Amino acid sequence: MKQAQKAFVWEMISSKLMKKFEPFHLEVVNESYKHKVAPGSETHFKIQIVSNHFDNLNLVTRHRLIYDCLDDEIKAGVHALSLDCRTKEQWQENKGFANPNIPCKGKGSFQKEKDK
């Protein structure tokens, strides 16, 4: 008997977002390798999503909808989401996405001003 193959976290995220938001465009990128985590980790994701479900919603509300949709994944170990949630109109006006992610310096790299 074959064992069921475990789904990758990014696949579960993509599937849930597709089902819930019916996006015009969706990109889910595992950016865990940019952080101080074990090789093969799936803890940090960049999500770019374009959906009419975001029409007339402010940015905070859009982000809350994504976090609510991915609650199980967050509870299971997804540590960070970089979200770019747009309406189809916003995406077409900007000709796609142009927001590069700021590189993470890794865990423990933050130093308080008084410690310097």
Image (tube, helix red, strand yellow):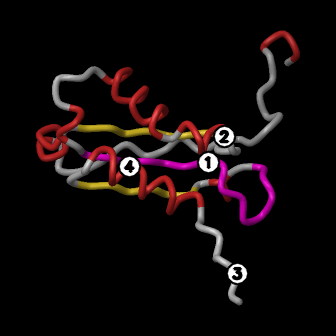
Q: Are marks 1 and 2 in contact (CB under 8 Å)?
A: yes
Picture residue at 42% right of the left edge, 36% below the top: 66
Q: Say whether marks 1 and 3 touch (CB < 8 Å).
A: no
**Position in image of residue 90 (x %, y %):** 17, 38
Question: Is disc 1 in contact with disc 4, using a CB cutoff of under 8 Å?
Answer: no
Q: CA distance from mark 2 to mark 4?
A: 18 Å
Q: Which residue is mark 3?
A: 3
Give the residue drawn at x 38%, y 49%: 17
Tell me the mark number nearer the camera, choosing from 3 and 4. Answer: 3
Q: Is residue 6 left or right of residue 87?
A: right
1 or 3: tag closer to the N-terminus = 3
Of circles 1 and 3, which is in front?
A: 3
The crowd level at tag 4 (other Cα within 10 Å; few <14, some 14-19, many 20+) is: some
Give left or right: position of 58 versus 12. left
Q: Secondary structure at mark 4?
A: helix
**Could you classify mark 3 by the number of other residues whose Cα lies within 10 Å: few (under 14), some (14-19), or many (20 or more)?**
few
Count residues near mark 2 (Cα–Cα under 10 Å), then give few for <14, some for 14-19, many for 20+. few
Q: Separation of disc 3 and disc 4 at Cα? A: 26 Å
* Residue, disc 4: 17
Name the outermost residue toward the top: 114
The disc placed on residue 44 is: 1
> Helix or strand or loop: what does disc 3 sit on?
loop
Nearer the N terminus, badge 1 or badge 2? 1
At horizontal 26% and vertical 38% (from top left) the residue drawn is 86
Stretch of the chain drawn in magenta: 36-50
Quarter occupied by the C terminus:
top right
Q: Which mark is residue 79?
A: 2
| First of labels 2, 4 by sequence position | 4
**x, y percentage for residue 56?**
17, 23
- Left or right: 63 in relation to 80: left
